[in-house]
Image (cartoon, helix red, strand yellow):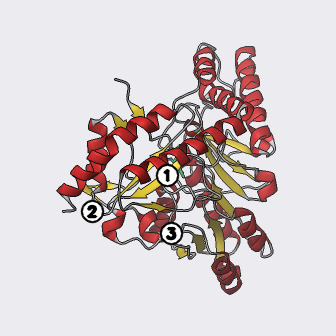
Amino acid sequence: MQRVYLDHAATTPMVAEAISALVDQSAKLGNPSSLHTSGREVRKDVEEAREAIAKFAECAPSEIIFTGSGTEANNAAIKGLFWSARESNPKRKVIVTSPFEHHAVMDPIDWLAVHEGAEVVHVGVSSDGVVDLDDVKRIIEARADEIALISIMHSNNEIGTVQPISEIVQIASEKQIAVHSDAVQSFGKVEFSFKNLGLTAATLSAHKIGGPLGIGILILKRGLEITPVLHGGGQERDIRSGTLNAPAIVSFAAAVKKVHSEFLERNNRVRHLKESLKATLNEKVSDIRFNGRSENSLPGILNVTFPGAPGDALLLLLDAENISTSTGSACSAGVAQPSHVLLSLGLSERDAKSSLRFSLGHTSTDSDVAYLGSVIGKVVERARAAGLK
Ligand SMILES: Cc1ncc(COP(=O)(O)O)c(C=O)c1O
């Protein structure tokens, strides 16, 4: 039997257009930085891809810096903005962030705190997973001259809540503070416009929207120079050295065009399926709670607490039934850790460890939800019988 894949937030299947583009471009010879005809032909493909992606992300093509992943783009933005701010004013060492960022934001910030003297200030968040704007205002008023940057995600990868980025940028811009936002989960799923948000920097990743693995984008405001993490050939505005991965870039653009052409249809269908999944779970399992909020959220992410049932047991029992899901939390030395995202919303360790993320995407169907509905009752019963160790 086919697997039921409910882990699209981890990675989603490539769309056919992106696969063809990847294969076709891989057959073309030439380094896009070479001056000869072969190089220039590949350069043209890369620049057309850059323009196509810029159109959808609503930024200037020159604001796009291709990287090897979303993780790399986050590192480049956060470290680069921090180092540049500190260089222009040694007092600027504060990084304002949320407590529920992805590790690809949280860990570079923690690294800067340990190795570069950064001070991390977390904004408060509501129990349904949204940044508290009054707290952002309070922090900015109190520490404006010390803040190097603000980095707050556009939407959360575990609970799907979309954050008030435009409002945050508005507050920060009064004090000329740079704002970076990790939009990896938002791009292609909810409205995202770099220009309208007024951000300094944003992060995108191809494999969350049907493009290939290993290609990301740092969108960085025109004209801004930041200290690079990587040094080398000076490609991508001297901010990200390394030969451009032309096949992945062209394939990313193909995925973007596809998402763009069916944006509303695709996302409305996925949101509808999520509502149907929610209803199914409510019908089949007693005493469950949904984390996050449904309004202003990503179409495909549903995070559920099944009190008394260990999340890792649920994941493995569902896997044995051919269903892929995620606990969202890290596993450290073989011991399941509670999700820092759920803890930040005020869940107890026990409840955080009894939670599962279902994430739907462009290939999800009604029969996926129906199949999950046919097994979830017995799976939760078994997991609850095993209990939390
Ligand atoms: C919110 C968020 N940021 C960053 C990343 C990392 O992106 P990549 O897999 O391209 O490194 C992910 C992927 O899981 C994510 O969900």
Mark 2 surroundings: few (<14), some (14-19) or many (≥20) residues within 10 A? many
Q: Quadrant of residue 149?
A: bottom right
Q: Helix or strand or loop: what does disc 2 sit on?
A: loop
| Residue sitting farthest toward the front | 283
Q: Nearer the viewer, residue 287 or 343?
A: 287
Q: CA distance from mark 1 to mark 2?
A: 19 Å
Circle 3: residue type: Pro
Residue 164, x across and y down, in percent: 68, 65
Residue 88 makes an appearance in the image: yes
Circle 2: residue type: Gly
Left or right placement of residue 17 versus residue 356 in this view: right
- Residue shown at 48%/50% (left/top)? 279
Query: What number is the disc on residue 308?
Result: 2
- Residue shown at 62%/38% (left/top)? 269
Residue 291, x across and y down, in percent: 48, 62
Left or right placement of residue 41 versus residue 93 in this view: right
Q: Is mark 1 within 8 Å of ligand 1?
A: no
Circle 1: residue type: Leu
Residue 333 makes an appearance in the image: no
Which of the image's four quarters has the N terminus?
top left
Q: Is mark 2 within 8 Å of ligand 1?
A: no
Mark 1 surroundings: few (<14), some (14-19) or many (≥20) residues within 10 A? many
Q: CA distance from mark 3 to mark 1?
A: 20 Å
Q: CA distance from mark 3 to mark 2?
A: 25 Å
| Residue assigned mark 3 | 99
Earlier sequence position, callout 3 versus callout 1: 3
Mark 3 surroundings: few (<14), some (14-19) or many (≥20) residues within 10 A? many
Residue 300, x across and y down, in percent: 55, 46
Query: What number is the disc on residue 224?
Result: none
Residue 141, x across and y down, in percent: 71, 84
Earlier sequence position, callout 3 versus callout 2: 3
| Residue assigned mark 1 | 302
